[in-house]
Image: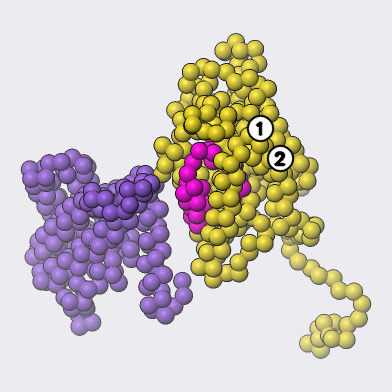
Amino acid sequence: MSKISEIEGAGHEGPTLNVAPSPHVSDITFTTKRMMTDVLIALVPLVAMSVFVFRGYAVKQLVVCVVACLASEALFVSMRGRKITLTDCSAAVTGIILALSLPGTAPWYVGALASFVAMGIGKIIFGGLGMNIFNPAMVGRAFVMIAFASLMGAGAYENPAGVVDAISQATPLNAFKGSGVATSVFDLFFGFTNGSIGETSALAALIGGIFLCVRRTASWEIPVGVLSCVAVLAGLADLSAGAGGYVLLHHLFGGALLFGAFFIATDPVTSPLTPRGKFIFGAGVGALVMIIRLFSGYPEGVMFAILLMNAVTPLINRWTIPHPMGDA
Amino acid sequence: MADQPTATERFLQGILPENPVYRQLLGLCPTLAVTNGMQPAITMACSVAFVLICANVVISLLRNLLKPHLRIVIFTLTIATFVTIADRVLAAYLYQMSKTLGPYIPLIIVNCLIICRCEVCASKQSPFIAASDALGQSLGFGLALVSIAAVRELLGTGGLFGYQLLPAAWPDWVIMVLPPGAFITLGLLLGLVNWYSARKSGGSI
C-alpha cells in the first residue's frame, strides 16, 4: 500500500506518460469546425456558379435554407437541453448543400420545410452531429420531394416565364430521358443548363471536390468509387446506343452526379470508415444512380442512391473490418 | 385477487397510462395503415371497439371452460366471428368505406391488442370487469388513431373530414397521407407522449 502511494505520490517529479486505449487523435487541428470550413470554401465555386446562372432564384434558395437550417438547429438543440453549437458551421453546410440541391423555381416554404426536417428528423432526433444515419440534407430533400411532388419533379424545374435563361429550358437529364434531346457537353461541363441550382456546373463541382480530397476533408475513395462505377455502366449504355462517348460524358457531367459524389456522399458521418468500405459505398452509389437514371421513372437518382447506401453503411462497416496484422 | 385493479381503474388505465398504441405499442398495423384520414380512422376505431368489447365479454363468460393449450384457438375463433360481423356490416351499410379500408378490417383478427386483452384480462376476470377494460382500451386506441389521423389529414390535405380548414394557399404535404407520413407522425407523437408522461411522473426521459 505504501509502495503504491510512493509511486503515485504527489511528490513525483519529471514527465508524465498518459496511457489511453486507441483510437488516438493524431492531429488536434483536425476538428469539426476545420472540416466544415473546408467544405464551405469548397462550396464557393458552386455557390458562385449557381448565383451566376440562376441569379435571384439561387440567392433566394440559399438565404432561405441557411437561415432555416441555423434556426432549426438552434431550436432543436435547445429542446434537447444541449449547448447550441452553431459555430461549428455544420448547420450552415447542410443548409447550403440543401439549397444547392433544390430547383430554383421552388417556393420559399419548400426550402424552409426541407431545412426543418433535415435538422429535426434527419439529425437531432438521432442525437445530433455525428449520430445521424442518413445525410440530413438528403433527408430534408427527400421529404419535400415526396411532399411536394409537383414542385420538385423534373417538370417543375422549367418555368417558361423565368427571368433567367436557364430556368426556361428543360433539365438536360429530363430532356434526354423524355424526348431524346441532347445538351451539348460544353454546356453540361460549364453549367449553363437548367437543374438544381448547384448541380449544373461539372467544372465547379470538380474544383471544389478536388480541393476537399486534397485537404483530406473528403475521402477520395468515395468519389472515385462513384465515378468509376458510373463510367463503367454509362460506358456500357454508350456502347449499346453507339453514341460515340456522348452518353458517357452526359451521365458523368449531367445532373447532380459530381456534386453528389464529392459533397454529399462524402459526409464522414454517414459513409463507411475503412478505405475499402468507402470504395464499396461509392460504387454502390454509382450503380444505384445509373439504375435509377436508366430504368426508373425519375431522370435523376443521386439523392435516393445516397440515402439507400447510407442505410447499408453499418453493413459495409461490418463487412470491411480490417484484420489486425498477424491475425489469420 | 385483492390488489387487482377495479373496473373503473381498468377503464381509466386504457385511455392514457396503458394506451394500447402509445404505451403498449400494440395494434400498430391499422394505426399506420388507415390513419391517412379521419373517416377511415374513426371507422377502424369503432370496428376494433366493437370486436374488442364483444370478444372480451364472450371470453370472460367462457373463462372457466378454457383449456390452457387451446385458449389461443378459442380467442382467435371468437375474435374472427365478431370481425366477420363487423366486416359484413361495413360492406352492407358503408360500402365505400369498406372498399377504402380493404383488407384492414379482416386483419383485425390478428390485431394483437385484442388477443392481449383476452389473455391478460378477459380470460381471468368477470364479464363486467372485462367489458370495462375493453371499453377503456378501445377508447385509448380510438384516441390514438384520431390523434394521428388529425395530424396527417390536416398537414396532408389542409382540412379534416374533407373540409378545408387551413387557408387555400396551404401547400398540401402529400407525404403525410402516404406511408412515410404514418411512421413519422407515429414516431413524433410517441415521443411527445413519452415526454409528457416523463414530465408528469417527475422523471427525465
Residue A303 visible in the snapshot: no
Residue A115 part of the magenta segment: yes
Q: Which residues are magenta?
A: A95-122
Is there a contact, CB below 8 Å, between mark 1 and mark 2? yes
Can you identify the residue that label 1 sits on? Answer: A201
Colour scheme shown? by chain
Q: Chain of mark 2?
A: A
Name the residue rendered at 54%, 55% in the picture.
A68
The colour applied to the residues of chain A in this rendering is yellow
Residue A245 visible in the snapshot: yes
Q: Which chain is displayed in purple in the rendered image?
A: B
In this rendering, the answer to whether B129 lies above or below B158 is below
Left or right of A224 on screen, residue B14: left
Residue A296 part of the magenta segment: no
Q: In what quadrant of the picture does the N terminus of chain B appear?
A: bottom left
Q: Residue most toward the right?
A: A14
Three-letter code, disc 1: Ser
- Count residues near mark 2 (Cα–Cα under 10 Å), then give few for <14, some for 14-19, many for 20+: some
Count of number-bearing discs: 2
Q: Position of residue B30 (x, y in %)?
A: 27, 51
Q: Position of residue B34 (x, y in %)?
A: 26, 49
